Structure formats: C-alpha cells, structure tokens
Amino acid sequence: MKDGRELVDLVINAHGGIYRWNQLNTVKVHVSIKGITWPRKGHPDSLDDIVFTANLHAPYDSWTPIFEDGQKTYFNGLDVALLNVSGEVVEESKNARKTFDGHELLTPWSRMQLVYFVSYATWNYMTTPFLLAQPGVHVLEMDPWEENGETWRRLQVIFPDYIPTHSTRQVFYFSQEGLLKRHDYWPEVLGNNSAVHYYSGYKEFNGIKAPTVHRIYPLNDADQTPVKDILLVSLDIFNITYE
C-alpha cells in the first residue's frame, strides 16, 4: 500500500472540490430508506418517506417526520433525542453508542437506537468523500480492484475516534474519474457484521456531485464479493439541497 492523499485529492475534486464544499454549511435530503434491516430491528416502514437535515462539517443532524407526524430527532454525534411538535423531548439517549454493547445482527433496537444508527450513518454517507480530508483520518491506497468490467482504485481508511462512523477501518472504491462506487465496512453496532455499499445515480446539486441510489448488501469477506440476494438497506434520494 502507498500514501493515499493523492487519491483523496482526486476524488474530492471529482465530487465538486474542497473549495466549493467549504462554502456550504448544511444539507437537506428527501429520501426513502428501505431494506430488511428495519423489520429485523423492529421498525418496519419508519423511514419510508423522510427528510434528513445535517451540518456538513460536524455530526449534527435531524430527521422529520419520524414515528409520528410533527416529531423530529436531534443528534450531536454522541446523544440522540426525539422531540414533539412543540420541541419538547419525548425520549432521549445519552452516549447512545454504548447502548449497543453486545448487540448482534438480529438484536432488536429501541427507537433511540434506530435514530442513532441512521443519524451517524447517513451523515457519513452525505459527507463522503469530503469526510476523508478531516484531521486524523489516515488513508492508504490499496491494489486496484476489478468489478463489472471496470478497474476501481481502492482506499483503506482508518477513522479517528472523534468521528462517529460504522467501523474504525473501512475500504472505499473509486472509478478512474474519482467517483465513489463502493464502500466496505463492518458496523460495530451490528456486531461487526460485514457490509458492502454501492453508490450510483450521480447528479449535481449546487456544485456537488452526489449519488442518489444507495444499495447495501452483506459482504462475503472470503472473496470480498456482495451477497446480492439480501438487500440490507436501500436509500433512494428524491432531492438534495446544499446551502
């Protein structure tokens, strides 16, 4: 493996560039999130038609409407809360990640655990690849990867503890032009079960190129291939507003 900073620069430029990114502060996403993960965890249909709003430069975000009309969530990287239409706290969980200790793939989630997972995960998805330029993120370029008749460049990323994310080590795959195509991770809150995330349907929103179709499957670690007959999570994005 070799230093991955040159590849990080390429992919950030391909997605709109760091200068444009730093001019923006927030993102608003209208999305439908489905897949077998949600009924498995006891929350079918909770994310079928929902709006995600986030700070682009720090892990602060919210979802609305969720569970009931008028309700929204709050996430600050550590804690989560559910607020009613008047802004009063209905439920909350401090240091929410600790509540997942001992969890496995099929362990049911509370509402606050669901909110924590989708909050940190979606914040990661909506800030990648710019997230890779954050202080303390270590990147190494791996050998190229062949898939679907294409050659993708690969990046091993080690995240610092201050960034809420799926796992300390993750692997990102990029087209020769620098667009994110695939992403492997081992979510700690899901018992470190392997997952592979595919990105497609790229569109430009206010100077930023972003995927609008996300598909997440189990990853076969033996040969690093997806198990595509099991759709863990899907995100279909209707619109993204960067401001």
Image (cartoon, grey):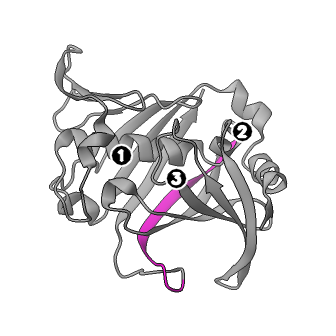
Of 12 and 187, nearer the camera is 187
Is 143 left or right of 113, judged from the image as shown?
Answer: right
On the image, the x and y values in percent for residue 186 come to 44, 62
Residue 152 at least partly seen: no
Residue at 18% over, 59% down: 107
Q: How many marks?
A: 3
Task: Say above or below: 48 vs 243.
Answer: below
Badge 1 marks a residue whose secondary structure is helix
Badge 2 marks a residue whose secondary structure is loop
Q: CA distance from mark 3 to mark 1?
A: 18 Å
Magenta residue check for 216: yes
Identify residue for label 1: 118
Residue 168 - label: 3
Residue 82 - label: none
Identify residue for label 2: 207
On the image, the x and y values in percent for residue 36 come to 26, 66
